[in-house]
Image (cartoon, rainbow, N blue to C red):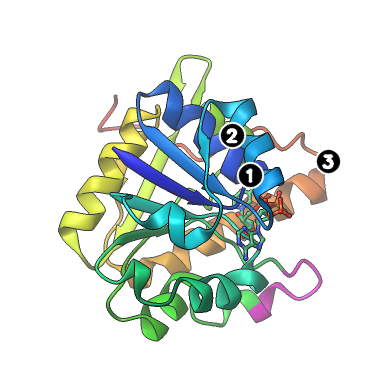
Amino acid sequence: MKIAIIGSGNVGKALAKSSVKAGHKVTMTATSTEKAAEAAKATGAHAANSNQEAVEDADLVIVAVPYDKLGEVFRGLGTAVDGKIVVDATNHVNIQNPGEVLGSLSNAEEIQNRHPKVRVVKAFNYAFAARMAEPVVSGTRLDGFVVGDDQAAKDKVLELVESIGFRPIDAGPLVMARALESMGLLIIMLQIKHSWPWQNGWKLVGPPDE
Ligand SMILES: NC(=O)c1ccc[n+]([C@@H]2O[C@H](COP(=O)([O-])OP(=O)(O)OC[C@H]3O[C@@H](n4cnc5c(N)ncnc54)[C@H](OP(=O)(O)O)[C@@H]3O)[C@@H](O)[C@H]2O)c1
């Protein structure tokens, strides 16, 4: 599939790498064409000159920017993403006051509320970038949870998730993005609390086994 990734940082590069490896055509952007070109060169993707240009022919758009840049990104995209599948991979992290994050709407729901014509799906945010690049750990596929209200959009994202190596799991409607974002916050806080090396990932064990 044709994938546009907005953001060429840890997540953008990791997903570009695994998506290119899976045979997808990936176009990426950053705040400058030079940074996008550098990331594209490192991952086998293509660089676009703008977010608008990147999404033009995309079957699926992944947003991998800091949470506080979401407004700027969507304002810039305008109607270019109306009707498109947009995967929100972001987390809102507040280590000092996790209650602020846990008690509010998910980023994905905020995007959907502000942009009702966008087919918003949440995925990837609960995984570290290292695991998005390589979701198989000691021969076991990590779980790739996907939530959204548009079943066809969610199915397409499940297909992507499986193609790059996760075990795809439909985890319900978009409101469940609150749970996925809580998992993202929890796994980050666990690394910090226990000085773990930011390499583990989520896996349900027991039936149904792979
Ligand atoms: N790191 C992880 O393991 C991880 C895991 C799960 C979820 N997340 C979430 O995923 C998101 C990205 O994380 P990250 O670690 O990849 O961050 P990062 O390394 O800081 O990268 C952010 C990227 O967003 C780009 N960007 C910012 N504003 C932009 C705009 N208006 N248009 C296009 N690109 C723009 C930046 O461009 P420049 O390169 O030009 O600065 C940069 O490439 C965050 O919300 C984070 O919470 C991160």
- Tag 1: residue type? Ala
Question: In front: mark 3 or mark 2?
Answer: 2
Ligand 1 is found in the corner quadrant, namely bottom right
- Residue located 24% across and 68% down the image: 83
Q: Are marks 1 and 2 in contact (CB under 8 Å)?
A: yes
Q: Which residue is mark 2?
A: 40
Q: SS for tag 1?
A: helix
Q: Residue furthest left?
A: 152
Q: Which residue is mark 3?
A: 195
- Tag 3: residue type? Ser
- Residue located 51% across and 59% down the image: 51
- Residue located 29% across and 72% down the image: 82
Left or right: residue 156 versus residue 86 is left
Residues packed near mark 3 inside 10 Å, few (<14), some (14 to 19) or many (20 plus): few
Q: Position of residue 32 (x, y in %)?
A: 69, 54
Q: Position of residue 45 (x, y in %)?
A: 51, 32
Quarter of the figure with the C terminus:
top left
- Residue located 64% across and 27% down the image: 42
Q: CA distance from mark 1 to mark 3?
A: 32 Å
Q: Position of residue 181 (x, y in %)?
A: 53, 63
Question: In front: mark 1 or mark 3?
Answer: 1
Residue 67 sits in which quadrant?
bottom right
Q: Within 8 Å of ligand 1, the CB of disc 1?
A: yes
Give the mark nearest the N terminus, 1 or 3.
1
Q: Within 8 Å of ligand 1, the CB of disc 3?
A: no
Instruction: Please give the range of residues in magenta.
Output: 94-100
Q: Residue furthest top?
A: 139
Residues packed near mark 2 inside 10 Å, few (<14), some (14 to 19) or many (20 plus): many
- Tag 2: residue type? Ala
Q: Position of residue 148 (x, y in %)?
A: 29, 63
Q: Would residue 136 be counted in the magenta stretch?
A: no
Left or right: residue 149 versus residue 144 is left
